[in-house]
Image: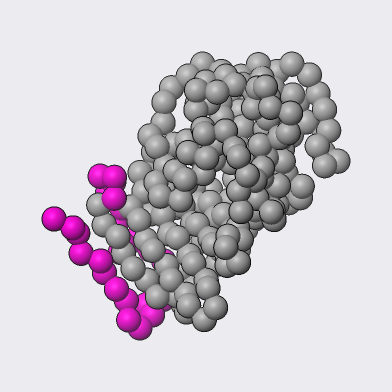
Amino acid sequence: MTKALGPWFAVAMAGFMLILAPAVQAQAISGPDAAPHADLYARVKVAGFATPVDIRQSGMKTRVDLTAGGGLQSYIADREKGVLISLTATGQNRLALVFPLDRAEGIVPLPLDLSVLARQATLKVVGASMVSGHPCRLIEFSGYLNQSGMVCASSDNVILQMTQKGRRDALFEVVDLTISRQDPKWFRTPPDYQVAVVPGIGGASGEAGAIEQPQPPGVITKPKKP
């Protein structure tokens, strides 16, 4: 599934699968130039992935859908409720693993919001360009995951492309973008998934009771390991 990627990007992707790191402060573009974007759908070409990744965002909720090992893998991060849900579908098997999630803004592997990057890095506008037919501002960044490079952000403050310094190909590039209200169903556990709650990962304090979902039969709660 993956090619050789920079270690920082691989770590970021792995971090999203489990739990997002706490935020750090940095000098950055501020004010309206870095205002957060609310709702969007994006299909993103990611370095090392054979097929594009689908990302949906609504307020403090983010969903990532990708194909891995021949199966569909989905991740729903809900910062308001403090949970991260991993959805795995293989054949007839449907499993939802629920992890606690730090409610604070953190490092994310595909920072589509310029506001997220602005809180983690120093930014400087250096020009203009086009990505997938969308005009965007070229912005140098430094300090994101201790790396530097270039992003191109649309007038809606959506990052359409990110390239690491010294790397020729983009780490990710948005190939399709729709800015609109997202259906709440995308951010809920489907009723045909068996749910397993994994408490206390990384010392976070998410609560399984905050998850919006029908109660399927055979709900499993994994006990803490001593």
**Residue lying furthest front in this view?**
4
Q: Main secondary structure of the magenta part?
A: loop
Magenta stretch containing residue 174, yes or no?
Answer: no
Which residue: 77% across, 47% down? Answer: 175
Q: Relative to 60, is 205 on the left or the right?
A: left
Left or right of 215? Residue 68 is: right
Query: How many numbered discs sit on the rendered protein?
Result: 0
Q: Is residue 52 above or below residue 203?
A: below
Residue in the image at 25% along x and 66% along y: 222
| x and y, in percent, of residue 223 in the image | 20, 64
**Does residue 87 appear to the left or right of 5 in the view shown?**
left
Q: Quadrant of residue 165?
A: top right
224 in relation to 151, above or below: below
Residue farthest to the bottom, as pictured: 217
**Visible in this render: residue 119?**
no
187 to the left or right of 25: right
Q: Was residue 216 drawn as part of the magenta stretch in this picture?
A: yes
Instruction: Report the magenta residues as a range.
Output: 201-226
Compared with 223, 39 (above or below) is above
In this rendered view, identify the residue nearer to me: 178 or 196: 196
Check the image and name the residue furthest to the left.
226
Q: Position of residue 22 (x, y in %)?
A: 38, 34
Asked if residue 53 can be seen in this view, the reply is yes
Task: Answer above or below: position of 186 versus 200.
Answer: below
State the residue at coordinates (52%, 34%). Answer: 7
Q: The C terminus lies in which quarter of the figure?
A: bottom left
Q: Position of residue 85 (x, y in %)?
A: 43, 59
The percent position of residue 225, horizontal first and vertical second, equals 18, 58
